[in-house]
Image (spheres, rainbow, N blue to C red):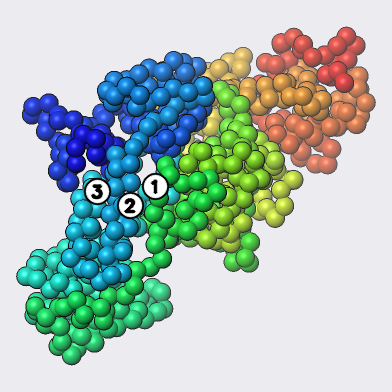
Amino acid sequence: MTRRGLRFGLLGTPVLYGDEPARGQALRAQCGLPVQPVTSPKLRTLLTVLLLDAGRVVSVEVLKDALWGGAPPLSALPSLHNHVARLRRLLDEPGRLLTVPTGYVLRVDDGELDVQVFDTHVAAARAARADGDWERVRGECRAALGLWRGTPLGGLAPEVGGYALVRRLQEARLLLQEWRYDAELALGDDRLADLVPELAALAEEHPLREAYHRQLMLALHRTGRQAEALVVHRDLRARLADELGVEPGPSVRDAHVEVLRGSGTRGGGTRDGASQWVRPARTPIAQAPYAQVSPGHLPSAQLPPAQLPPRQLPPAPAHFVGRADTRQAIAHALSTTDGTTPLVVLSGTVGVGKSALALHVAHTLEKRFSGGRLYLNLRGTDPCSAPLTAEQALAALLRDLGVPSGAVHEHPDAASALLRSLLAPTRTLLVLDDAVSAAQVRPLLPAGPGCGVVVTSRSPLTALDGVARFPLAPLSDEESAALLRAASGRDGITAGHPLVALTGRLPLALRVVAARLAARRALTPDALAAQLAAADSRLDLLDYDDLGVRRSLDAAFGALTASERRSDRDAAVALRHIGALDLPSYDAPSLARLTGVDEARAEAALERLAEVALLEETAYGRFVPYDLVRDFARERAAEPCVHAPPGCHFASA
């Protein structure tokens, strides 16, 4: 093609076509066209997001989310402008990348995007196959496969989305390979022997895909290797019976008969003979690239089973100890077979290890959730950003599943329905981390019986129905010591060491202490324990790098203080008084007397603090602060309370 032909490439790492590279850097795709790599990761991401919605407006917010993973820096807008300017210079075509009031539009003409050209060849190959024109089938398949440079959208972060597009293209490539080998077998030329190693590799890579085994049987048989062809059939039949409890399909059975009868020998393949074992193509995959799909006709729901399931889970915790019974109970709850979607909520105080437990369990359930594992941080207590709204969360999940941003309905009910439709036929695990409320979670829940959901939250989210709830307590002394030993590399720490109690047995605090010990080999556990015991506030020493107990508590306290609900503001002021009074435990009557409010209001404040896991209700009406929360409350007690009017210790009504 010419410079005005193929221009953009997504069938592999995103690239530009058409410009001859500098001498010594002559890169060419398999199709023979010169390739201009896009070396900057940010520019690749920007180009890809614009190409996924080619010819349509891509908003600034969508681009910022893709470039910075939903947490853009303060300088995101000027940085985005710089990246756009760099991309324009790389494209070197005035009018190609346009600025509009709400975002940007990348103009892509017919035949300029390799995905479009690939789809055109797929459609032509399908039509030729239906007509029995095997020569044309072979040519179209070779042309389409020649555009393939690797996994589509390769090297991009999950935030870019396009998962369903990649899934569709992967399946289309497998079909093209099937059709190409069908054509080679039907034409029956002297290349049959060369097909054997290629088909053997494909059969090994896709052990349950019958077409490749059928083709391998026929290629072996027609090149005089009948015994090997029968072994392929025997192995395939045994595998299907063992793993799926089924027999091979009609095409494989027909090929088996040909091998047994000794018919179809080398050179004997004809167009008519081929039609006896080549079956009609399956229902076509959605053919239009996403840049051309209207919001009301998404191909996602018509896609074949996933070839590339999402694997978005962050790494499992390197040092995980304890909670064996809870882990087993969570795995059991997620394995329900009663036709409902299992929903698990892990709740507990700051730093108790909710996210670590969720990820640890989720990583062990890969076989149960073969459709993939999605992960979304809802930022319920993130000190640097507001919690995600339900609309933002839905848009993020739908983009992860390949729905273009322009096709996400603005009404959350419609977006939620689309999410349920996409997940319903799959076995997908959804991990929703750091939720703030049931209202934030409810629109994100799938309805398919094969799916499962794990939610972490300070609150038990009791407004959600049908939930298996697991409130997490701090670790035991033995578990705490084991975590310290594993994370710090210090073998001599026992369950009775002072560090165990001084950290409140909270995994987050234990990890901070372990990080300090690992960073300073000369610092002994006894010396660090002495520093913690002598400090005015242990929270100063329980902060290291990006780990910190105080910042998590600050986020929880700040959310209560800034809330529009009176009960939240009352809870924040009540925590200050708890720090000032410093009693072993609290109840509504005593707090009411000490603060000058009625008992009902005092009780509501205490219940709210317990709901967000800053207090623990050890008995009915009796509340105790968690160990490190008590230190935090003392710090807040020393600050002026801007919400309390004269004569009243709680927030004004």
Of the numbered discs 1 and 2, the one sitting upstream in the chain is: 2
Q: Which residue is mark 2?
A: 119
> Which residue corresponds to mark 1?
289
Q: Position of residue 457 (x, y in %)?
A: 63, 39
Verify CB contact (< 8 Å) between mark 1 and mark 2: yes
Given residues 108 and 639, the one toward you in this image is 108
Residue 54 placement, left or right of 537 = left
Q: Name which residue type carries label 3.
A: Trp
Count of all numbered marks drawn on residues in the image: 3
- Residue 519: x percent and y percent? 38, 24
Please identify the quarter of the rendering in which residue 649 is found.
Answer: top right
Residue shown at 34%/69% (left/top)? 281
Mark 2: which amino acid?
Asp
Q: Residue at x 93, y 26 (%)?
A: 598
Q: Nearer the viewer, residue 234 or 409?
A: 409
Of badges 3 and 2, the one in the foreground is 2
| Residue 298 screen position, x and y as percent | 50, 50
**Disc nearer the start of the sequence (3/2):** 2
Q: Secondary structure at mark 2?
A: helix
Q: Secondary structure at mark 1?
A: loop
Label 3: few (<14), some (14–19) or many (≥20) C-alpha neighbours in 10 Å: many
Let me know if residue 472 appears in the view: no
Q: CA distance from mark 3 to mark 2?
A: 12 Å
The label on residue 148 is 3
